[in-house]
Each structure stands twice: as C-alpha cells, then as structure tokens.
C-alpha cells in the first residue's frame, strides 16, 4: 500500500461507498479518515507496537540514564582518573560531567529501547499465534526475552534470565490487571 503521490494506492471502502477509492479521489474528510485508519492499523500491528515500545523505551531510558548519572557525582565512569572530580577546575568538572551524563543517558536509552522492542514484539507475536490475550503471553515473552538477552552467559545464565524476566513480567501484568475486574452488579454498598 503506497501513500506516495502517483502511487495509485487503493485505500479501501471509506464512507460506505461501494467502490474503493484512490487517495486523490477522496474528499479531505475521507482522506483524514483513511489516514487515521491506516495509522490505527499500523499501531495495532506487531511491528507498530514494537517500534512504539522501542521509541518510548529509548526516551524513558535516556531520562533514567540522566538521572542515574546525576547521582554519581564523584568520579565519572570511563575517565580513568584517581583524583576526585571536586579537585578539578569548575569548567573541566562541567565538561566531564556533561560528557558522562550523555554517555550514560545514551547507553541506558539503547538498552531500554532494545528490551522494550524485543519484549513487545515477542509478546505480540505470541498473542497473535495463540489467538488469546492472557497472562501467559507476557510470561512466555518475558522468558524468551530474558533468556535471549542472557544467552551469551551460557545455559545457566539463560535459564536465570528467563526466570527473572518472566517473574518480572508476571508481576507487572498482575499489577496492571488487578483493577480490570468486571464492575459490580449494582452501585450500592453492601
């Protein structure tokens, strides 16, 4: 499906008309509706969910990395210096601190984004394969993601990575779904 000019894309039956229309034959309202529906199709697809989770994880990981870098205020990682940073001139302190904050934020952002994209893509794929939406999708995705991330440390590391990530995923799923019970049959307090 192409949305580019001259692509001749056939966007389907919008507005209850009998024949599918090209993007250029639509009214502005129909174009807006077609664009919104295409965006919703993308965001509910597994690749769309993975991209969204990766981008969101990257942003949150960057914020987390900045916060954690601000907590380590004496000797920045990677400088190889023994002299405490407080003994250096102010300008050099700021340069070292901002460089360190940038490195930590970027490293944390990459990790969070990668884990978010892999976990979400795996969970969505399992849910699509099983055709069920229950807690076992998250548990399975957590196990596969944790085991996959720890595979380089050997079978024991992969096993513990699987167990830890599955347990964390289960805890988060149970916490998020604890208030999703059906509403009471009446509004009165018994």
Image (cartoon, grey):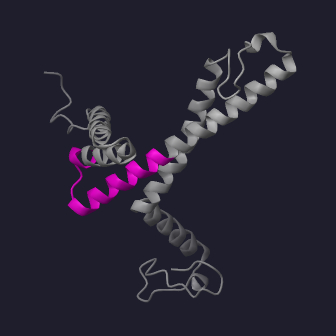
Q: Main secondary structure of the magenta part?
A: helix
Above or below for 48 versus 158: below
Q: Residue furthest left?
A: 190
Residue 162 picture location, percent across and down: 29, 41
Q: Work out whether 19 lies above or below 135.
A: below
Closer to us: 97 or 33: 97
Q: Quadrant location of residue 180?
A: top left
Residue range highlighted in magenta: 114-138
Q: Position of residue 144 (x, y in %)?
A: 30, 49
In the rendered image, residue 152 lying in the magenta stretch gets the answer no
Q: In which quadrant of the rendered image does the C terminus lie?
A: top left
Query: In the image, 29: left or right of 128?
Result: right
Q: Position of residue 160 (x, y in %)?
A: 28, 36
Q: Name which residue lies at 18% across and 34% down.
A: 184
Position above or below: 91 against 178:
above
* Farthest top residue in view: 87
Asked whether the viewer can see residue 40, the reply is yes
Q: Is residue 23 left or right of residue 94?
A: left
Taking the image as shown, residue 154 lies to the left or right of residue 97, namely left
Where 78 sits versus 127, above or below? above
């Amino acid at each position: 499906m192409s949305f580019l000019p001259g692509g001749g894309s056939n966007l389907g039956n919008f507005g209850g008309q009998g024949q599918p229309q090209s993007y250029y034959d639509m009214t502005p309202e129909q174009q807006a509706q077609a664009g919104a529906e295409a965006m919703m199709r993308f965001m509910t697809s597994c690749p769309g969910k993975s991209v969204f989770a990766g981008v969101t994880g990257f942003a949150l990981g960057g914020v987390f990395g900045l916060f954690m870098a601000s907590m380590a205020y004496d000797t920045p990682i990677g400088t190889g210096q023994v002299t405490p940073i407080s003994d250096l001139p102010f300008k050099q302190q700021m340069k070292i601190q901002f460089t360190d904050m940038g490195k930590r934020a970027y490293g944390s952002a990459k990790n969070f984004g990668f884990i978010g994209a892999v976990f979400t893509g795996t969970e969505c794929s399992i849910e699509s394969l099983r055709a069920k939406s229950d807690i076992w999708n998250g548990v399975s995705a957590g196990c596969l993601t944790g085991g996959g991330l720890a595979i380089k440390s050997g079978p024991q590391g992969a096993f513990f990575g699987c167990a830890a990530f599955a347990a964390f995923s289960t805890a988060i799923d149970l916490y998020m779904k604890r208030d999703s019970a059906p509403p009471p049959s009446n509004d009165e307090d018994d």
